[in-house]
Image (cartoon, rainbow, N blue to C red):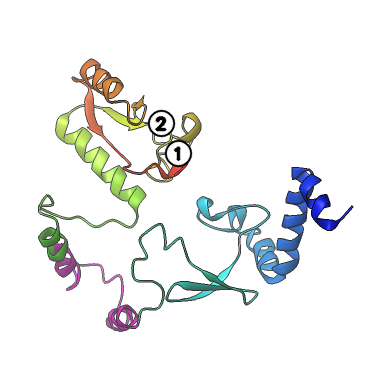
Amino acid sequence: ATADSFKRNADIDSVLNDARQRFVDRNPKSLARHIDAKQSLPGGNTRAILWYNPFPLTLVSGNGCYVTDLDGHQYVDLLSEYTAGLYGHSDPTIAEAMIDAIKDGVMLGGPNRYEAQLGAAIVERFPAIERVRFCNSGTEANIMALTAARAITGRTRILVFRESYHGGVMVFANGGSPLNLPFPFLLADYNDEDGVEKIMRENADELAAIILEPMLGAGGC
């Protein structure tokens, strides 16, 4: 049998095991770092979505659309921090602005001169936004928005969609997560307009907000 015919007839487990072993052999420094990191970090990192088998690569630098790992391999970055990295890595104008800000001091414990400038730019760009409050993460922003909606309306329930994701404590893939916020969530099917309207009408007196992920990243996108 030729090598090509063997590959065509190999079972999936053998192929996967071979791929994993080649990955391990190619990335010994990332593996060593991962083993060390697991001693102090669950899963060897602080962001569960970045973990994968057999271990995630350790990235050490980025430039433009490229990232480089601990073993010296360069990759095209198609993730772009889940679309937050719009300008790529190490943009000189952004880097210079960050260095200037750090020189002036970080976490000063009071209003600084930059936050209002950024807020004004956002309000000007998006007419629907009247005021801005900045948060440390998308998860925190969603929590603040939903708790505000509950406080303002005096209602409690939140309508979400199956397979959606709104942060580490609002995961609705595969029926939800035991780590989710203890809010009374109502589950609807994405794109089921009639079903959503029915749920809204049945819970009109208790529904505080609907949170929508326009593109279901956790739903197979």
Magenta: main secondary structure equals helix
Instruction: Please indicate whether residue 69 sits to the left or right of residue 129 in the image.
Output: right
Q: Residue at x 21, y 67 (%)?
A: 110
Magenta range is: 92-119
Specify the farthest residue to the top.
202
Report the Cα–Cα distance between label 2 and label 1.
8 Å
Q: On the rendered image, what quadrant is the C terminus found in?
A: top left
Q: Residues within 10 Å of mark 2 (few under 14, many from 20)?
A: some
Question: x and y percent of residue 106 in the render?
Answer: 31, 74
* Image coordinates for residue 104, horizontal then vertical, percent: 27, 82
Q: Position of residue 160 (x, y in %)?
A: 33, 32
Determine if residue 177 is in view.
no
Side of 20 where 154 appears, left or right: left
Dot 2 corresponds to which residue?
A: 162
Element type at mark 2:
loop
Q: Looking at the picture, which amino acid does disc 1 mark?
A: Gly
Kind of residue at disc 2? Arg
Q: Are marks 2 and 1 in contact (CB under 8 Å)?
A: yes
Give yes or no for residue 107 being in the magenta stretch.
yes
11 or 217, which is in the foreground? 11
User: Height in image: 201 above or below 61?
Assistant: above
Relative vertical location of residue 184 with respect to residue 7 in this rendering, above or below: above
Asked if 206 appears above or below 164 in the picture, the reply is: above
Q: Residue tagged by mark 1?
A: 219
**On screen, 75 above or below 20?**
below
Q: Which mark is residue 45?
A: none
Q: Please give the name of the residue rendered at 41% of the width and 31% of the height, measured from the top-left corner.
A: 162
Residue found at x 77% / y 48%? 8
Point out residue 190 in the picture as x, y percentages from the top left corner. Answer: 35, 31
